[in-house]
Image: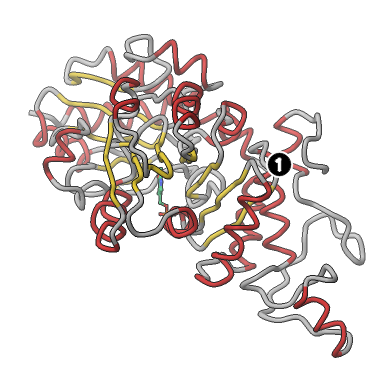
Amino acid sequence: METGSSMKIATKCVHSGVKHYEFGPIVPPIYQTSTFAFRDADHGARLFKGEEEGFIYTRMRNPTIEALEDAVAELEFGTKSIACASGMAAISLVIFSTTKSGDHIISGKSVYGPITTLLGQIFSSYGLEVSFVDTSNIEEVKNSFRSNTKLIFFETPGNPTLLISDIQVISKIAHTFGAKVVVDNTFMTPVLQNPLKLGADIVVHSMTKYLNGHADVVAGIVVFKDENDYLHFRKFSNHIGGVIDPFNAFLVHRGLKTLYLRMERHCSNALQVAKFLEQHPKVEKVWYPYLESHPQYELARKQSLGGGGMISIELKGGLSAGKALMNNISVWKLAVSLGGVESLIQHPASMTHSSMTPQLRAEAGITEGLVRLSVGIEDPEDLINGLEKGLSSIE
Ligand SMILES: *Cc1c(COP(=O)(O)O)cnc(C)c1O
């Protein structure tokens, strides 16, 4: 399918990235090879000089990986993409490729926990200046740019608070400062939200989550609006080397085919579960972007086509109530990660966001009593019954 095709997204999920291959398979073959033979010495030399298109070595380019990269680029309305070994590898590639010592970057506060460690402890030890900002607050965003700001990175909805950041407004502000806008679209997927159409320059995903969708692969991707950014990043990727392998690329590409169907179900299940939780006497507060009680419900409706599959809740009994829920729930699995077909429950403060400093955690609104749910594609009645069993165990 050509990039920019006018097909609807459900069709694109099925067909994107698939080209014609020898023997006519309808699924891209798994080219499980590290290297590619040259026809003769001159052919090899021409490939290395870039005088001819072709494959040299899998760290640089591989047809199975390229099929997935083409597919995700098309779904995200980008020109090109680079698939990586994990979401963290994708985010590391963004930072390596866009910044050097002495530069400044802005990161959302409410982001995947290990990202705060990567930026605030690891990259900052190489001389990168990092500000963690509440990107749902536009005034705070405006005031955080400096003359050396190279990029702003955020997730929307934020993890795990599900606060919404306005991609369009932030992109306009960032561009007046000459900074790139990088949106982590893992929670929404291209089915629900298209940051590049709203003004962002780069989208990253942990494909470990919804894009693959079956909790059996760790992978990430960087998608570009501008092909020049891609070429610049590709040079870094070729030398840093955190690339995906062909078999995992095959699995993620396979997962994409059902992405639209899965997201429809994740959204409808999550809305039902969120409404159930909102009226439950043991629940203090529910955060879900498509609940009218969400502080940015209007923005969520404007920016995305669905609320997604993630819900965070605060129980009346705080952490001890949360523990009782997690230990007594049925159907739902107690595990970190998200975006798979099975429903998961976890406690951010002691699990996914435990590597954050307590101060940053508090500032980001991640309280001790917050419990995060990843709603799967099971029957919603079973999910609600499983939750009710856990909730009724709270003293
Ligand atoms: C999981 C996750 C990541 C990190 O991805 P990995 O594939 O685990 O390396 C980054 N951002 C978000 C929003 C995530 O949920």
Q: Quadrant of residue 151?
A: top left
- Colour logic: secondary structure
Which residue is at a point 31% across and 22% down the rendered structure image?
137
Of 328 and 207, nearer the camera is: 207
Check mark 1 vs ligand 1: CB closer than 8 Å? yes or no: no
- Quadrant position of the C terminus in the picture: top left
Image side of residue 37 versus residue 115, left or right: right
Of 191 and 272, nearer the camera is: 191
Q: Quadrant of residue 262?
A: top right
Q: Is residue 216 visible?
A: no
Q: Is residue 69 above or below residue 37?
A: above
Please tell me whether mark 1 sits on a helix, a strand or a loop.
helix
Residue 285 in the image, given as x and y percentages of width and height: 22, 19
Q: Is residue 314 above or below residue 112?
A: above
Q: Is residue 386 visible?
A: yes
Amino acid beneath label 1: Glu
- Quadrant position of the N terminus in the picture: top right
Of 59 and 65, nearer the camera is: 59
Image side of residue 320 versus residue 109, left or right: left
Residue 101 in the image, given as x and y percentages of width and height: 34, 59
Residue 392 in the image, given as x and y percentages of width and height: 18, 26
Image side of residue 262 versus residue 358, left or right: right
Image side of residue 227 versus residue 134, left or right: right
Residue furthest to the right: 23
Q: Number of numbered discs present?
A: 1
Residue 83 in the image, given as x and y percentages of width and height: 59, 57
Which residue is at a point 56% across and 45% down the rendered structure image?
211
Q: Mark 1 sits on what residue?
A: 74
Q: Is residue 251 above or below residue 307?
A: below
